[in-house]
Image (cartoon, rainbow, N blue to C red):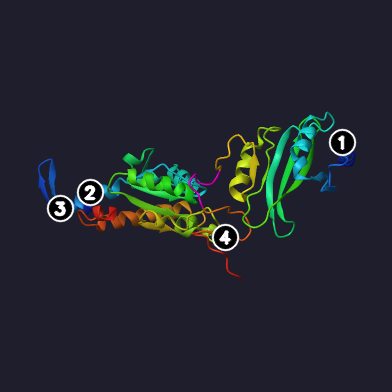
Amino acid sequence: MGVISKLPVYMEKVPGGGILTTTAEKFFNWSRASSLWYMLFGLACCAIEGLMATGASRYDFDRFGMMFRASPRQADLMIVAGTLTHKMAKRVKILYDQMSEPKYVIAMGGCANNGGPFYYDCYSVLKGVDKIIPVDVYIPGCPPRPESVLEASLKLQEKIKKQKLGEWSASTE
Amino acid sequence: MDSESLLNHINELHKDIIINSELITDVPTIEVKPEHWVEVCSSLKKDVKTNLHSISNYGAVDYREKLGGFQLVLTIFSHKHKHRVTVKTLVPAQGDEEPEIDTVTTVWLSADWFEREIIELFGVKFKGHPDPRHLMLDDDWDEGFPLRRGWTGTDFIVKPEM
């Protein structure tokens, strides 16, 4: 009974049910955090851990309201899972721009955080996805365990629940 | 045919052309001058005894300081006889020069993508290549040839001495 215990500011009982009273801010944040649909989009080996293993039944991403969507138009969350090359960086930027607001980004693994093993002596890899798009949560690891992807999504939900109404639109500037 | 007799056969086939020939880990390896590059390749393919019909590997090495040019290394394989041969040539180049050599796509069509990669990464041009666009790098890449020795670019971090 998560809704009744967390959401309402005031609850009035009427016969056969009840009326919940809450603030719009709390209601929007609660619904945004509880249905983060992530984009089905992987770049390298991290996609196997972060999207496939975590999304499958053993780790069960669905229980946090995380569902993959095959289109950026329907997605709220982009998990940048893997090595981002300069050539791919432009495409990732386009995909990010196509996502509708509010949108969030998780940088997964060493390569997406800062280039990882490709930091030195590499001509083709972008040194961190935060050079092109704003990142909300970083996950270390090479590759991270599925549990840390779940932890990151919980951290992101905490962050979303704290945001103020209209705050997210400032991130696009 | 074992590797040694194969090497002898190739040596007889191109008596005056081959500069250097040896067995490297049981693979017959020959070196030719760049002007004989296509000629040797096509005869290795057409000769009944060698019959080298497919490319295993095709790359380049930057030997500008050591030997004065880019070495092309081509390893070819025969599915019929189950043997492989390596052919090398040195394309002379100094400094920022972009040297030119004849393409072997006229012999094996599958050399297309290998040569495209050598074009973008080493800056060796192939005369008569059917489609000399970039293969791996972005289309608007303009920072030179990243696999050349001493190359640096924006966002390129050289590993410090440990």
Please tell me in which quadrant of the rendered image residue B126 appears: top right
Counting other residues with Cα less than 10 Å from the Cα at mark 1, is it few (<14), some (14-19), or many (20 or more)? Answer: some
State the residue position of label 4: A121
- Disc 3 element: loop
In the image, which residues are magenta? B136-142
Q: Which residue is found at the position 58% from the left and 39% from the top?
A: B132
Task: Tell me which label, 3 or 2, sits earlier in the chain.
Answer: 2
Residue nearest the observer in this picture, B89 or B7: B89
Position of B33 with respect to B4 (left or right) is: left
> Is residue A82 visible from the viewing direction of this image?
no
- Disc 2 element: helix
Q: Amino acid at mark 4?
A: Asp
Question: Could you tell me what secondary structure mostly forms the magenta stretch?
Answer: loop
Position of A118 with respect to B7 (left or right) is: left
State the residue position of label 2: A3
State the residue position of label 3: A23
Q: Are marks 3 and 2 on the same chain?
A: yes
